[in-house]
Image (cartoon, rainbow, N blue to C red):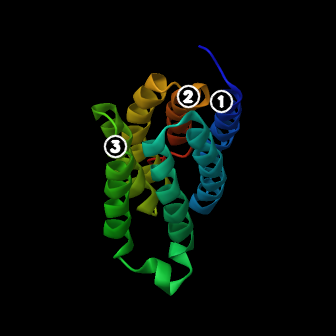
Amino acid sequence: MDLNIFDLLGQILSIIAMGLTIFSFQMKKRKQILIFQTVGTGFFLASFLLLGSWTAACLNIVFLVRNIIFYFGEDKKWAKHPIWLPVILAAVIGAGALGYASPLDLLPVIGSIFGTVATYMKNENTFRLLKLGDSPLWLAYNAAIPSIGGVVCEVFNIISIIVALIRYRKKKV
């Protein structure tokens, strides 16, 4: 792979984003997960811009807004409104259309629909389960770009989600 300075910086930022995102799934509370995911999303946004992946960059802009809205969804009246889920899903589809260059770009859009519904969920384990529908599609997309941090992130996301599901499972008496 012939890397220029933008590619190199994009790969470095994707690795930082990867660390933040993987770590997020080990947080116990939904708000803690969302904080780490939001910061990681900012790094992925910069990474995808540098790597020239316009669909992923557009989607990550939506993710930043989505995560902030859903973070405040428990505390702020404006953020609790049920209109947010369909609005953000429409924004995901719109971002995918805006950045669309090939059928490959459908993978992160479909994954992002899972991820958006997951982020909307209040239950942490439901959040994690739905993210398992998101990560494999982003894994395939990141492998095709290529985004080293993105690929490693999705592999570890899947592992981290499974570990967290086991750690935080409801114990039956």
Q: Considering depth in this image, is 39 or 144 the residue closer to the camera?
A: 144
Residue 115 at what x, y percent from top left? Answer: 41, 50
x then y, percent, for residue 131 = 43, 44
Mark 3, secondary structure of its residue: loop
Identify the residue at image location x=54%, y=82%: 76
Q: Position of residue 82 (x, y in %)?
A: 35, 76
Answer above or below: position of 159 versus 65: above
Mark 3, Cα crowd under 10 Å, few <14 / some 14-19 / many 20+, is: some
- Answer whether labels 2 and 1 touch (C-beta < 8 Å): yes
Residue at the disc numbered 1: 11
128 w.r.t. 7: above or below: below
Cα–Cα gap, marks 2 and 1: 6 Å
Identify the residue at image location x=48%, y=78%.
Answer: 79
Marks 1 and 3, how far apart at CA = 22 Å
* Residue depicted at 31% across the width and 34% down the height: 102
For the N terminus, the image quarter is top right
Residue underneath mark 2: 147
Amino acid at circle 3: Tyr
Q: Nearer the viewer, mark 3 or mark 2?
A: 3
- Earlier residue among tags 1 and 3: 1
Left or right of 107, for residue 40: right
Q: Amino acid at mark 2?
A: Ser
Q: Is residue 106 visible?
A: yes
Decide if residue 169 is on the left or right side of residue 109. Answer: right
Secondary structure at numbered mark 1: helix
Q: What residue is pinned by disc 3? A: 100
Q: Nearer the viewer, residue 31 or 17?
A: 17
